[in-house]
Image (tube, rainbow, N blue to C red):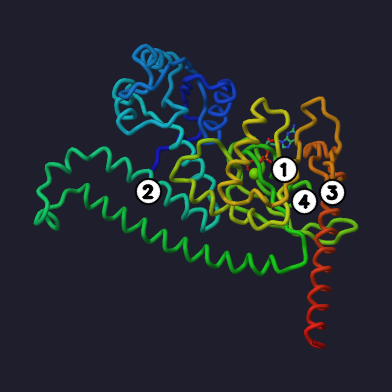
Amino acid sequence: MLERPASGERAVIVQLDFGQPDIADQLEEVRLLTESAGGMVVGEVSGRRHSPDPKTFAGKGKVDEVAAMIASSDAQLVIFNHALSPVQQRNLERDLKCRVVDRNSLILDIFALRAASAEGKLQVELAQLEHLSTRLVRGWTHLERQRGGIGMRGPGETQLETDRRLLGNRVKLLKERLRRLSRQRGVQRKARRRGDVLNVSLVGYTNAGKSTLFNTLTHAGVYAADQLFATLDTTSRKLWIEGAGNIVISDTVGFIRDLPHSLVDAFHATLEAAVDADLLLHVVDSASNARDEQMAEVDKVLEEIDARDVPQLLVWNKIDLTEAAPGAERDEYGNIVRVRISSRTGEGLELLRETLAEYARAKAESRRKALDEAARLAQTDFYN
Ligand SMILES: Nc1nc2c(ncn2[C@@H]2O[C@H](COP(=O)(O)OP(=O)(O)OP(=O)(O)O)[C@@H](O)[C@H]2O)c(=O)[nH]1
Ligand SMILES: [Mg+2]
């Protein structure tokens, strides 16, 4: 449904600067996004603007520059790392005589490529339909005004309305199915939480190294790649920790700034599992220039899904690319708050395991106390 740069499709990327501080990182991000969708970046156009042009997003001079870049690089499509209105997209396609894809479509597209579970596929389809429906509505409002109203429906209705109604039916159906799946998941989750074992979820910006760490710890063979959104579905595994027994660890979808609106629900539903964990391992690409912004973005999303009060341990990953040495840092109460590791070389992993063991023992201890207390209360009740 959405157009995707097929394997090796040649793309020109466009990144405009409206005064954001991290423009180089955004260029890097759209490069990775394009490659993650199967495209090949053959040209880049960047520039500064005060505010977007309502008709073509970029100004006339920039559009000409993009056209020249398309010609010289023999590109097949143009990717704007911005949200374009349907009108802007149409005007750009007309002026550039080339397919134009915006950031939201691109991210939706990668999600569509990666969705593997039944639920993930439904969520992505729903997001795509919702994205499409806003385009239909906005693009066709002029027709709506010409329509007569009562008595004009049924056989006289336009193709668009039929499409839109079909779309609406499908959206309703998908939402119902997702509601059912989410109820089932809630039941499964409750069963898991009742257990004694420590539940740990890996969270973090896309490409931080969550799946690599997950694989190293559990020998699971989950897909890890230098791509954005390599992981879409949550995977859980049991992990044996010396001195603490089994814990359950889950790998989750990566976070990204400015997630398309239609994907936010799907994304949040998938992340609900993280809310229920005893501990979040916030994996950070410590070698990234955008590290601080990425951490802030992750915290923002955690707040949105009410997961801010779940204990969090920072996992400072990829130290092999920096000067940092493996190690752990404690807060004033003696709790470990940050562990510096490399999932690639394995440095610091032993420390991480020990930290997990500490948390697991603390959970077992507090559970034992709670049970003792419950037993004591039951007894007092009995004798009073
Ligand atoms: N140098 C180095 N590279 C790493 C390290 N950990 C992961 N990587 C690389 O970083 C890239 C992303 O790793 P993933 O494990 O797929 O990252 P992720 O956080 O699961 O990403 P998403 O699933 O897209 O959210 C891969 O190319 C990994 O090989 C590390 O400690 N050092
Ligand atoms: Mg992953």
**Label 3 within 8 A of ligand 1 by Cβ:** no
Label 4 near label 2: C-beta < 8 Å? no
Q: Nearer the viewer, mark 2 or mark 3?
A: 3
> Which mark, residue 355?
3
Q: Nearer the viewer, residue 267 or 209?
A: 267
Name which residue lies at 70% across and 37% down: 284
Q: Determine the CA span between mark 1 and mark 2.
A: 33 Å
Q: Secondary structure at mark 4?
A: loop
Amino acid carrying label 3: it is Thr
Q: Earlier in the sequence, mark 4 or mark 3?
A: 4
Q: Quadrant of residue 363?
A: bottom right
Give the mark nearest the N terminus, 2 or 4. Answer: 2
- Give the image quadrant in which the ligand numbered 2 is located: top right
Q: Residues within 10 Å of mark 3 (few under 14, many from 20)?
A: some
Could you give the CA–CA distance between mark 3 and mark 1, rounded to whole angstroms? 19 Å
Q: Which mark is residue 212?
A: 1
Q: Which mark is residue 219?
A: 4
Q: Which labelled disc corresponds to residue 129?
A: 2
What is the three-letter code of the residue carrying label 1? Thr
Spot occupied by residue 123 in the image (x, y as percentages of width and height): 47, 53
